[in-house]
Image: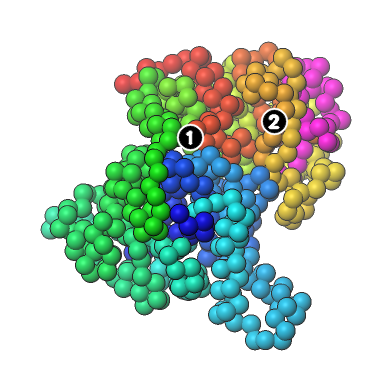
Amino acid sequence: MSSNTKYIFVTGGVTSSLGKGIISASLAKLLQARGYTVTIQKLDPYINVDPGTLNPYEHGECYVTDDGAETDLDLGHYERFLNVPTTQGNNVTTGRIYKTVIEKERRGDYLGKTVQVIPHITDEIKNRIKLLGKTGNYQFVITEIGGTVGDIESLPYIESVRQLKWELGKDALVIHLTLVPYLSASGELKTKPTQHSVKLLLEYGVQPDILVCRTEHPLSRELKNKVALFCNVEPSAVIEARDASSIYEVPVLMELEKLDLVVLNKLQLTSGNYNSEMTEWKEFLHKLKHPKQEVKIGLVGKYIELKDSYKSIAESFIHAGVANECKVQIEWIHSESITPENVADKLKGLKGILVAPGFGNRGIEGKISTIRHARENNIPFLGICLGMQCAVIEFARNVLGLADAHSTEMDADTPYPVISLQEAQKSVINKGGTMRLGAYTCRLADSSKAREVYKKDTITERHRHRYEFNNEYLADFEQAGMMATGLNPEGALVEIVELTNHPWFIGVQFHPEYKSTVINPHPLFVGFVKAAIEVGVVVAK
């Protein structure tokens, strides 16, 4: 077998949102299950340097890696499928590419040459693609190219793929994801959009090796042969990608279509044998499809119009639900719709409440009302990041009697800033000021709910926030029953708070959802769902 790293490029055509990220992650899962080491990277064609400054309505959630990179949400899929951490090197944007090239030009690195898209931009793209391969940690690097073939902003990436395919020869392969639409009027599947998409790719000098065809109906052998003939690929390399009830079903569907075997054959590698990971995956899928019970949990946030804004949280509930053999039915509730007068009605019937992260003061009062309702009615509660900070503010106002308690982010003149800006902790990547980004250590207090859930005394979790608990008030909080049960050992910053007189009330400053995977569901979510089940179970129909 060749010791060279193999590079697989995944492009998309016809329309966006066909699922390049899920196909990439599914192929990676199948190769990993055969014993290969795999990583996936995302090339994004937008000019933002990273998604850190993007509104969640624009791009969904911003996914944070251990090394503090603010990245595309597809990296969350990669980690959830592979159970392997990603890094800053797994997400590259056009903005970052151009920023690097311009900085090199300003330093004189190009020795006075005219800086152009070819070769300077394409060379920088190629360097970023090969960076992960050069670490020696991976036998496969799968590169997903954002956007659709034909988009003007994707052209430098497609050109880079053309050059790399020429340079790497048998160590590179291109998978093109297209759509085979069904016309109900004629009762036919139509291959013409796929043909046009491949023709456009050929105009840029790239011949796809494998076609993955998204479809609502099965592709017949005749239709696969037709696509193969017109698109210049082998019939076995035309892969049917039917719509699935769950993204976690896609690896199994791709296994049935032999996508991984086609890839290995084309790269002249041995197939190996599936290990226990695919067995575990199928067990997970079976439990997902056959829950023994159902529980309704409210997700209170301010970006709920776009569910992708809380993608990792939604997926963490799926993982935790399966771990408890339970279907978690998420009730999406906009925090701006909640008032002290209607809170009981809005949250009626919920067996657990999660208050989601976010930035800015919009919807804050609704979150505070929600938390008060959960605290006073013994409803299991999990607050994440801003959700934890709102829990602190609510407790200060309604238990400690600090009526004006707030955050310095919301009102810099408040006399009781129980959440304050901490200058002591500098971020891995600064974004508009001091920010904690990436993995930080947290020590858990003995006999705490957090210690019971994690089953260890020291944890590492990922952060994305600017504000911290104000330790000047810590003694008052603990005396009244809100304990700081998780502390950052370096700066004594509060990471976890919980109530002593409540069945399950935990607020965390970090983002546990970023580390939940199919194989390792996050213990906080597992414990939270278990607590919600114990409060009241709705038997699945």
Could you say whether the residue bearing mark 2 is in a helix, strand or loop? strand
Q: Which residues are magenta?
A: 465-492
Does residue 491 belong to the magenta stretch? Answer: yes
Callout 1: few (<14), some (14-19), or many (20+) C-alpha neighbours within 10 Å? many
Q: In front here: 329 or 226?
A: 226
Question: Which mark is on residue 274?
Answer: none
Cα separation between marks 1 and 2: 19 Å
Q: Which amino acid is tagged 1?
A: Val
Earlier sequence position, callout 1 versus callout 2 = 2
Q: What residue is shown at x 51% (from left), y 52% (from top)?
A: 139
Classify 457 as above or below 195: above
Q: In front here: 74 or 236?
A: 236
Residue 451 position in % (x across, y down): 68, 20
* Residue identified by numbered label 2: 459
Q: Are marks 1 and 2 in contact (CB under 8 Å)?
A: no
Can residue 188 be seen here? The reply is yes
Residue 37 position in % (x across, y down): 51, 47
Residue 274 position in % (x across, y down): 39, 38
Q: What residue is shown at x 48% (from left), y 60% (from top)?
A: 7
Q: Which quadrant would residue 492 be assigned to in this image?
A: top right
Q: In front here: 375 or 31?
A: 31
Q: Which quadrant would residue 170 be assigned to in this image?
A: bottom left
* Residue identified by numbered label 1: 518
Can residue 333 be seen here? The reply is no
Q: What residue is shown at x 45% (from left), y 54% (from top)?
A: 1
Could you say whether the residue bearing mark 1 is in a helix, strand or loop? loop
Classify 359 as above or below 369: below
Callout 2: few (<14), some (14-19), or many (20+) C-alpha neighbours within 10 Å? some
